[in-house]
Amino acid sequence: MKSKTGEHRFETRAIHAGQRPDPTNGAVVVPLYQTSTFAQPAPGVMRDGYDYSRADNPTRRALEHNLASLEGATHGICFGSGCAATSAAVQALGAGAHVISFDDVYGGTRRLFSRVMAHDDRSFTFCDLVDPDAFLEHVRPETKALWIETPTNPTLKLADIAAISARAHEKGLRVIVDNTFMSPYFQNPLALGADAVVHSCTKYIGGHSDLVMGVVMTSDDAYAEKVRFLQLSVGAVPGPMDCWLALRSTKTLAVRMERHAANAAAVAEFLEGHPAVKAVAYPGLPSHPQYALAQRQMSGFGGMITLVVDGGLEAARRVLDRVQIFTLAESLGGVESLIEHPGLMTHASVPPEVRAELGIDDGLLRLSVGIEHVDDLIADLKQALAG
């Protein structure tokens, strides 16, 4: 699925890759092929490979081409959610696979690994991958892959993708990176040595809080074939409408990410100087313990911020009650700014003792900084933190 515009820059590929004008009528925007099946000119003879929309759909195919181009992959394989994409990426490793995962991952990922997939013949070990050598002591004969989320959710720790990939490949292991927080615009794990990339397209790729979708991207033909077989056989595919919405969104991904990052940088600096805030985590702050890695590995620092308010849960609830522009809601990456309490919301399924080990305490809040005017966002947080 390599784009013919692969030599062009990101902003150009975002608008054109996989999106040629419709040959029948010249429509510039890829049509919404809202159909479940396709007429066959003869039994078993398909037009351009289409017979049933679970197997393939022209709108989905255009999106898969587009996303693969943006991530620098040969294959893009879309699913009905980020969790469905995660599940397929691990299932494609084969029966009995052992996976070593970053410990601080999205709560839904940890739940999927430890409470769903671990009940079949797969197993998972969680460890802190801030140290690129940390996984080595956990490698077993049945270990097949490392699962990296960087920055992590919600504490925004970073994993050195290049260093870990080099070590993993020496052991014959695949490296799969959840790149949701950075989007393909700010980070390209395949270029750093990773073997596959997963996104929750629900977040920055969709960008408007109006779709749920996931994608697996890779340039490994054999692995891609296994993932696509699961896409067909399990059937956890996105509908044409969601694919059409995602294609609309990728056109503005570059400009949105620039604004997200600019706003987040200003908000993070404000929070770092506020007396009611005990700690701020943002990869773009020089105070971040892995700031040097962030500068080397990412071309921008994204729109996600974690802060710890002084006063624990009571103070955190007070901030959540007072915000007016920031919306109290799960998810992230939309044009609107969101705020949430991981311990009570996105990571509530993570056992309390594990949350404590990861530093997800009662005063921790997660911000998804949107693209509103930054002065209004800072004013909102200032009044919410006052008194």
Image: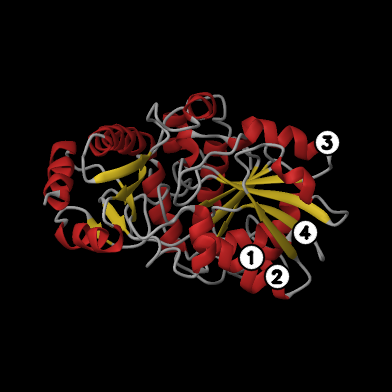
In the image, taking residue 306 as reference, residue 182 lies left or right, namely right
Query: Residue 339 location, x and y as percent?
Result: 28, 55
Of 172 and 249, nearer the camera is: 172
Mark carried by residue 118: 2
The residue positioned 43% from the left and 47% from the top of the image is: 205
The reply to whether residue 106 is visible in this rendering is no
Mark carried by residue 170: 3
Of 340 and 91, nearer the camera is: 340
**Amino acid under label 2?**
Ala
Mark 4 → mark 1, Cα distance in angstroms: 11 Å
Mark carried by residue 98: 4
In the image, taking residue 17 as reference, residue 223 lies left or right, namely right
The earlier-in-sequence mark between 4 and 3 is: 4
The kind of secondary structure element at disc 4 is strand
The kind of secondary structure element at disc 3 is helix
Q: In which quarter of the image is residue 221?
A: top right
